[in-house]
Amino acid sequence: MKILIISDIHANWHALQAVLAKESYDALIFLGDVVDFGPDPKNCVNFLMKTSKARFWGVRGDHDHALAFGTGSNCTEELRKISNISSEWGECFLSGEEVGFLRRLPLDRDFSVDGIDFEIAHGSDPYSYIFYNMVIRGEEPSVGALDRSGGDEKRKFILTGHSHKPFVRTLGNATILNPGSVGQPRDHDPRASYGVIEDDEASIRRVGYDIEKTVKDLERSGMPCGVKTRLISMLVSGAVIN
């Protein structure tokens, strides 16, 4: 069993295509944020909709929620301003069915695959925010947070996105994985980042793609010039640079 884990696609179809071209898989886990910041939300959402008819487990990210329900995303004030503009622009390309798909994605999910338990969430919602962000920062979670990793001997995987920074860590009987971002990495490596679980082993993988194609799509978009310039800078640098 090979499971592909993707997160934070952010409407970057060219990056997603590169991942799909490199990896075959038996099941797909999506950890949120398919829309916003990028030039092609429709193709990205359509891919998830088609995949959801097979072995698929997905959750709604804060940018998915913002577009689907008309709220603000859970990011910094500066990025929220950019998000509000790019989200409004991107929504125009999505049908009611596609927006409905985003609305129906849960905020978190627990399930089992071949006898192994999974707990997944984007990591930005209030219930998982403290736990996931302590792990993201490399801090030792509190006793209460440790309880989330389970009190039994059964192995499990806890999967989260949101930070755009990949990692794999072990916490007791749990393997905690953040696959990083497919469409907008922020760890100073602009290649698409994703995770794979194969033979019960978790790993982070990267693949290069033609960033210039996404840049050109952004340049041709109807977003304001200042927003496009900022998004292109983040895309090329693989980081949020002030």
Image (cartoon, helix red, strand yellow):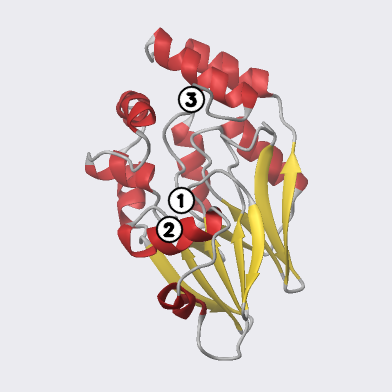
**Coordinates of residue 116 in the picture (x, y in percent):** 61, 80
User: 103 left or right of 229?
Assistant: left
Which numbered disc, 3 or 1, marks the residue that appears first in the sequence? 1
Q: Quadrant of residue 182?
A: top right
What kind of element bears circle 1? loop
Question: Badge 3, how many Cα within 10 Å: few under 14, some, many 20+?
Answer: many
* In this view, 155 is above or below 47: below
Residue in front for this viewpoint, 174 or 97? 174
Query: Furthest residue to the top?
Result: 225
Amino acid at the residue labelled 3: Pro
Amino acid at the residue labelled 2: Val
**Coordinates of residue 171 in the picture (x, y in percent):** 61, 73
Question: Badge 2, how many Cα within 10 Å: few under 14, some, many 20+?
Answer: many
Instruction: Determine whether label 1 and label 2 are within 8 Å by CB.
Output: yes
User: 47 left or right of 97?
Assistant: right
Residue in front for this viewpoint, 36 or 90? 36
* Residue at screen point 33% across, 64% down: 127
* Residue at screen point 51% across, 44% down: 8
Instruction: Determine whether label 3 and label 1 are within 8 Å by CB.
Output: no
Residue corresponding to mark 1: 32
Quadrant containing the N terminus in the rendered view: bottom right
Q: Which mark is residue 39?
A: 3
Question: Badge 1, how many Cα within 10 Å: few under 14, some, many 20+?
Answer: many
Residue corresponding to mark 2: 59
How far is disc 3 from disc 2 in space, using C-alphas? 22 Å
